Amino acid sequence: MGGVVYLNGLVVDPKERGKGIGTKLLFEFKAKVQQLRATMIFFFVPAANRSSVNFYDQNGFIKGKEYVFFSKNLEQRGS
């Protein structure tokens, strides 16, 4: 497997959404990743962020199986 690239964030101003800007940004990002000869992009999206989950689903991304994500809420008792 080639290199892995982590996408830290892809944000479009809420007033500008629905104009294809996110899709264009994602297309350019994927092209740059391919130039780097990486073979995988990974990132995290909160499950509650349905619009982002749907966006990535519509753009051919699948929910990962290669990595396990762990989290811990440090504000809970017994943390």
Image: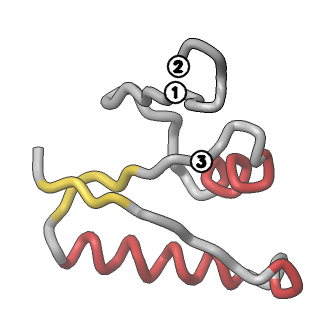
Q: Residue furthest right?
A: 15
Q: Amino acid at mark 3?
A: Val
**What residue sits 44% from the left and 82% below the top?**
28
Q: Which mark is residue 6?
A: none
Which element is circle 3 on? loop
Tell me the quarter of the image containing the N terminus.
top left
Residue ranking furthest to the top: 78
Whichever of labels 2 and 3 marks the residue nearer the N terminus, that label is 3
Which residue is tagged 1? 72
Question: Mark 2: few, some, or many residues within 10 Å (few <14, many ≥20)?
Answer: few
Circle 2 sits on which residue? Answer: 79
Q: Residue at x 30, y 79 (%)?
A: 32
Q: Are marks 1 and 2 in contact (CB under 8 Å)?
A: yes
Q: Residue 77 falls in which quadrant of the image? A: top right
Q: Determine the CA span between mark 1 and mark 3.
A: 16 Å
Q: Which coloring applies here?
A: secondary structure
Q: Earlier in the sequence, mark 1 or mark 3?
A: 3
The numbered mark, 1 or 2, whose residue comes first in the sequence reads: 1
Q: Is residue 68 left or right of residue 54?
A: left
Q: Tell me if residue 10 comes above or below residue 63 in the rendering.
A: below
Q: CA distance from mark 1 to mark 2?
A: 8 Å
Q: Position of residue 35 (x, y in %)?
A: 20, 78
Residue under pointer 3: 45
Query: Left or right: where does residue 49 sit relative to residue 2?
Result: right
Q: Position of residue 48 (x, y in %)?
A: 77, 40
Q: Amino acid at mark 1?
A: Lys
